[in-house]
Image: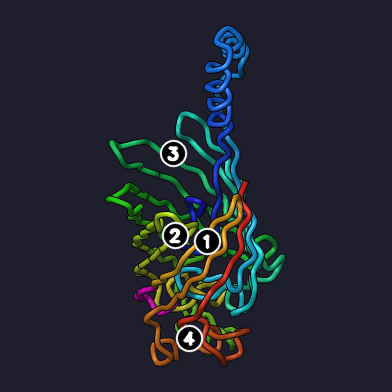
Amino acid sequence: MILPGAPAQAIIVGSIKMKSVTALAAAMLVSATAAPAFAQDSASESEPTPAVTVSGSATIASDYRFRGVSQSNNEMAVQGGVTLAHESGFYAGVWGSNLAGWGTFGGANMELDLVGGYKVDLGSGTLDVGVTWYMYPGGADKTDFAEPYVKLSGTAGPATLVAGVAYAPKQEALGRWYNTGADAAAGVYNNPGDKEDNLYLWGDAAVGIAGTPFTAKAHIGYSDGNPGLGPNATSVAPTGKYWDWSIGVDATWRNLTLGISYVDTDISDRDAAYLQPSFSNGQDGTGSIAKGTGLISLTAAF
């Protein structure tokens, strides 16, 4: 499962909710066929459906790409999360990943997302409304920010489709404190305290291949935000406006999912030149962190 606050944001993180009720129902059906009287006794003694379910996942990935841009210096990432969901539709969760290079804000060098929201069924689809609070424990000041989101999911034939919008209102973490990477490297604030907003639109599609453990998947997203650098010399939308996309396949066995995908953006070296040296491997001005690359991940869900 992709945690509700991280739309395509952690492209390769997933989880499967525990469904003890299904197993219980199957056991009751077998009992009813063999011995009806015993089945009635079992049914009366069965536990009620839990009001709260817990789901989670742990992932090791070849790279952590957030909206197409590497947050782990084009290196491996270890990620994990837990979500509590109430039968009313309300849920809350936490998700984390290590960071490096462009994503490093000091401190623990990790991202910790707190997520809360509400899901409601709409006919054959589901509406999901919530907010993600992006935190960087012990990192640079003024880097945390909140981003509300709305997602609508449903099916079309064999395809599962998701459309989403995330809008982060004006906050210092999203501001254009530095106009260029050179200003950031020199420690010269152009607009200290500036506050900007950020908009992200995305769509996801997944199609299971009948008779196989494989699921084909695709993602496309569009960012519109600050074309400069924030107080941490990074930006949620590095060049202001850009597209990101990915295509891949998942193979699932029991609670394990192996994911292989290709992710890319339309951010060229020329577009990102004014952001250097920040927008690079290790923020040293060399190596792109937004060019197309293959990703592989292994996720264990519970």
Residue sitting farthest toward the front: 34
Label 2: how many Cα within 10 Å (few below 14, some 14–19, many 20+): some
Q: Nearer the viewer, mark 4 or mark 2?
A: 2
Contact (CB < 8 A) between labels 4 and 2?
no
Identify the image's colour scheme: rainbow, by chain, secondary structure or one colour.
Answer: rainbow
Q: Nearer the viewer, residue 202 or 185?
A: 202
Name the residue that disc number 4 marks. 275
Label 1: how many Cα within 10 Å (few below 14, some 14–19, many 20+): some
Q: Position of residue 97 (x, y in %)?
A: 63, 63
Residue at image coords 58%, 39%: 18
Label 4 or label 2, whichever comes before in sequence order: 2
Marks 4/1: CA–CA distance: 38 Å
Kind of residue at badge 2: Thr
Name the residue that disc number 2 marks. 215
Question: Element type at marker 2?
Answer: strand
Name the residue that disc number 1 marks. 251
Marks 4/3: CA–CA distance: 38 Å
Q: Nearer the viewer, residue 43 or 93?
A: 43
**Magenta residues?**
238-244
Marks 2/3: CA–CA distance: 27 Å
Q: Is residue 287 above or below residue 254?
A: below
